[in-house]
């Protein structure tokens, strides 16, 4: 991805996620994918990223199963990129990153985009809650589960590729 960081020997889900989507251009590509961008030219125009960088990031996202490449024209051959289920699962991550930027970069008054929940019409702000009890979760509320072992990031990504 054009980075020098190597997370392959880490045993950490954050490092594993960074291995797939940790490049800033990748996160902006995903942001735009959630806003409906599916084709190379609109991404290139919106982001101003070099064409070779955009092509490399899209290729990586496809290789990791975050985006799916689909033909939409045979002559000339043209493709679009659609979020997969794996890609759609990043929606909360991007909303949470945006909320952090709203609070800590834009000063809490709200950032450049404000979201409204379509179902209730109220302003939306993401939050973390326990799936089991519904209570909000703060950093001090979590502890690691005992006795769980896991593969390294490199091993996990190799296994995911094999599936």
Image (tube, rainbow, N blue to C red):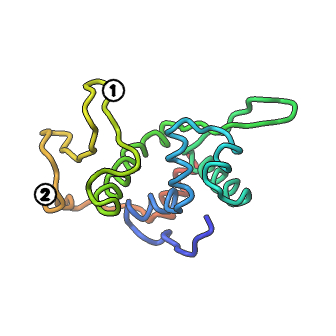
- Residue labelled with disc 2: 141
Q: Is residue 104 above or below residue 66?
A: below
Q: Which mark is residue 101?
A: none
Judge from the rendering whether residue 66 lies leftward or rightward of residue 50; answer left or right: left
Q: Please provide percent x and percent y for residue 40.
A: 69, 44
Instruction: Specify the quadrant that holds the N terminus.
Output: bottom right
Q: Is residue 153 above or below residue 59?
A: below
Q: Please provide percent x and percent y for residue 69.
A: 67, 39
Q: Nearer the viewer, residue 110 or 72?
A: 110
Q: Is residue 107 above or below residue 77?
A: below
Closer to the observer: label 2 or label 1?
A: 1
Judge from the rendering whether residue 161 lies leftward or rightward of residue 93; answer left or right: right
The residue at 29%/24% (across/down) is: 119
Instruction: Specify the quadrant that holds the C terminus.
Output: top right
Callouts 2 and 1 close, C-beta under 8 Å: no
What is the count of numbered marks?
2
- Name the N-terminal-most of marks 2 and 1: 1
- Residue labelled with disc 1: 118
The residue at 38%/60% (across/down) is: 13
Near mark 2 (Cα within 10 A), the count class, few <14, some 14-19 or many ≥20, is few
Q: Please provide percent x and percent y for residue 10.
A: 42, 70
Kindly state the secondary structure of the residue where label 1 is placed. loop
Q: CA distance from mark 2 to mark 1?
A: 30 Å
The residue at 35%/42% (across/down) is: 114
């Amino acid at each position: 991805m054009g980075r020098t960081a190597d997370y392959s020997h880490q045993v950490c889900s954050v490092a594993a996620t960074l291995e797939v989507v940790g490049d800033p251009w990748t996160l902006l590509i995903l942001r735009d994918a959630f806003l409906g961008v599916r084709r190379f030219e609109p991404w290139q125009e919106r982001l101003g990223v070099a064409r070779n960088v955009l092509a490399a990031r899209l290729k990586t996202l496809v290789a990791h199963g975050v985006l799916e490449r689909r033909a939409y024209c045979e002559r000339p051959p043209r493709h679009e990129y659609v979020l997969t289920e794996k890609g759609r699962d990043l929606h909360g991550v991007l909303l949470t990153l945006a909320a952090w930027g709203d609070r800590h970069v834009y000063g809490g008054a709200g950032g450049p985009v404000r979201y409204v929940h379509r179902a209730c019409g109220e302003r939306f702000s993401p939050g973390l809650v326990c799936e089991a009890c519904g209570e909000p979760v703060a950093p001090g509320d979590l502890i690691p589960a005992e006795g769980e072992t896991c593969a390294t990031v490199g091993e996990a990504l190799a296994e995911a590729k094999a599936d």
